[in-house]
Amino acid sequence: MTRKRKGKSKNKGISNLSNTILSILKKERNQSFNYKQIAAKLGVNDASSRNQIIKKLRDLQGKQEIEEVERGKFKAVINSEYHTGRLDLAAKGNGYIICEDFEDDVFIASNNINKALHDDEVEFYVYKRRRRGKLEGEITNIIKRSKSEYVGVIQLHEKYAFVIADSNKMYKDIFVPINKTFKAEDGDKVLVKLEDWPEKADSPYGKVVQVLGKPGDHNTEIHAILAEYGLPHEFPYEVEQFANQLDTSITEEEIAKRRDMRKDLTFTIDPKDAKDFDDALSFEVLDNGLYEIGIHIADVSHYLQEGTILDDEAYERATSVYLVDRVVPMLPEVLSNNACSLRPHEEKYTFSAVFQMNDKAEIKNQWFGRTVTYSDARYAYEEAQAILESKTNDIPAEVSLTGKAYKTDQKLADAILKMDELAKIMRGIRMRSGALSFDKVEVKFNLDEEANPIGVFFKTSMDANKLIEEFMLLANRKVSEFVGKQDPKKTFVYRVHDEPDDSKLANLQGIVSKFGYKLNFKDRKTTATSLNHLLKEVNGKKEQNLVDTLTIRSMSKAEYTTHNIGHYGLAFDYYSHFTSPIRRYPDVMAHRLLQHYLDGGKSANEDVYEEKCNHSSNMEGLATRAERDSIKYMQIRFMEDHKNENFVGVISGVTDWGIYVEIISNKCEGMVSVRDMTDDHYAFDQDQFAMVGKNTGMTYQLGDEVVVKVKNTDLVKKHLDFNLLGKPEQEN
């Protein structure tokens, strides 16, 4: 639907003229302007408007808000300090600036946004007055745009077009000249690139750079999700060509440079549908009774040489993106699924962390370096789990990769059983040290051949998953510790996780107390113990997903940096990502740096690697958001086929505009608008996290079970609306 646009009013007073003049002068505070220049910026040239500007300049001068620096030329009087921060826009056009100079975010009214867009880095000043207890400010300059491309639907007119952005954070339609529409048809979903935002223009100007397809079409919406976050869906031709021409053969010359571990018993454990296997484990019992366990990681850095277009592309992507129906890999298939994939019965170049440990999982010796390995077997998690549960080498048909029951090699089964024992010991030590145990349920979809969701299932972590996790954590921690403890200090890529914010923990306490749970935040140890107890208590209960999500949100965000502060969630003083270089660029950097230091190299340039860490963290964030959007999109597609069914859900959020409900059986979340709650007049009770009926006293509180029915599904906006049918006991 076309948005109405206001035409220019003629021969009327210029609205909000004082603030407009002040905004112009403050934005370019190092220049002076006369009335003619201001009139030109406002796009007016009639005598009445010029007289208004002259009069207002004198008024502002009299109030000492501006000064006349030379005859007829004025500058703003700057009484406030300027700051820089990041703009967080609300859907209604107002926003908040997040700035390290202030404890609280600074409110920015929509008329003071001054053409800044969501997530832009901006310069602003703060008023002396406060708004609702919050600081209020005005944006004076845009330092850096956060993005220049937007996904939206194009509306064609005879001589121009407008693109209406999908994102509710984009508060303006984008004007597109008719010769820059890229042959898009009316109603197409497109990717538009911002080119300019003229001083006098109400809307930014742009050009269509890609036609994505028709809104609602599956591939269109998936490509739109990637495009919204600036993520590619295919490799440039020249990058594919470069990768395909690499020598991926295993040569005797290269083997001679490495530790040869091809005779060591080696295997992989991965998901059933995995296509790339970037880690393997080896197991040997030594003559002295110790166990030698190797964590072998694909040696991506052997093929991914710095300074090549392949490396440049991998760095820009920084991560693989895992959408519901596809993977957008960091590396071309010739590497990700072939040369660097530790497939069974194939020799591969690897980078290894090898540990000798006793029955108490105490490490007695360690070694890091480049190796060549041979994988004896590939297991799915379900197959490894069958071994752990039966304590035998029998693999039942129902979990077998081949669909047929078989007996695996007894030595391999014994290795998996022993490594599980050691993994459980290491996990116990981590938990006692204050590590947090997040086993959040993952939503997965059964898809038909056309990527239609025909079922929902939940992925949970089994002992086989935890076995792999513990040994990957061991390698990541020990590699990081090895470099981090060197003297003099060496630059390295750490994965850090700060302690949680006290205010977020207090907010978590306030919410979970509604379910009868108590937390103890006396010190770090009691906090971790208390949170783990909470996560264990809610396991299997209706509020589990809600509490798990809220607890994760109360945590600080993990990130990559050269400045080590440890990892709170894992209770490690040193931690890095080393074990997934096929899908994470920071792991590639860790491999390169470790080898550089093993070769006796000097410390790498910290500033260079810190910039690379920041880029990797940012790209990880974009990929995570894209992955969540794809899940939300698929949930809505799934619910489209279940519009006539009633569902029991849990209230997962309460706001003054409605309640959010998560369906228990499939984890799909939608909203019930307060306007649709017509059996009473409901008001939001912030203290109780509830909607309360004024006449009946009926209360819908966070965590309550309710019955809902689908009202509307919007694939384009990825929004799901419910009708509220009441509580389960009220249902007829």
Image (spheres, rainbow, N blue to C red):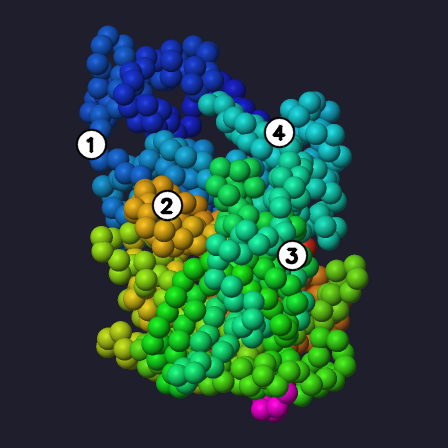
Q: Amino acid at mark 1?
A: Asn
* 231 over 584 or under it: above or below: above
Residue 437: x and y, percent?
A: 42, 76
Q: Which residue is mark 1?
A: 79
Depth check, mark 2 against mark 3: the one in front is 3
Q: Could you tell me which secondary element the residue under label 2 belongs to? A: helix
Q: CA distance from mark 2 to mark 3?
A: 28 Å
* 305 over 278 or under it: above or below: above
- At 43% from the left edge and 10% from the top edge, which residue is drawn? 47
Is residue 417 visible in this depiction of the protein? yes
Say which quadrant the C terminus sits in.
Answer: bottom right
Q: Residues within 10 Å of mark 2 (few under 14, many from 20)?
A: some
Which residues are drawn in magenta?
389-393
Q: Which residue is mark 3?
A: 337
Q: Amino acid at mark 2?
A: Tyr
Q: Is there CB contact under 8 Å for labels 3 and 4?
A: no
Please name whichever residue, 375 or 238, is drawn nearer the observer in this view of the structure: 375
Q: CA distance from mark 2 to mark 1?
A: 40 Å
Which badge, 2 or 3, is on the more N-terminal residue?
3
Q: Which residue is mark 4?
A: 207
Q: Which residue is mark 2?
A: 609
Q: CA distance from mark 1 to mark 4?
A: 40 Å
Is residue 462 visible in this depiction of the protein? no
- At 46% from the left edge and 23% from the top edge, which residue is drawn? 199
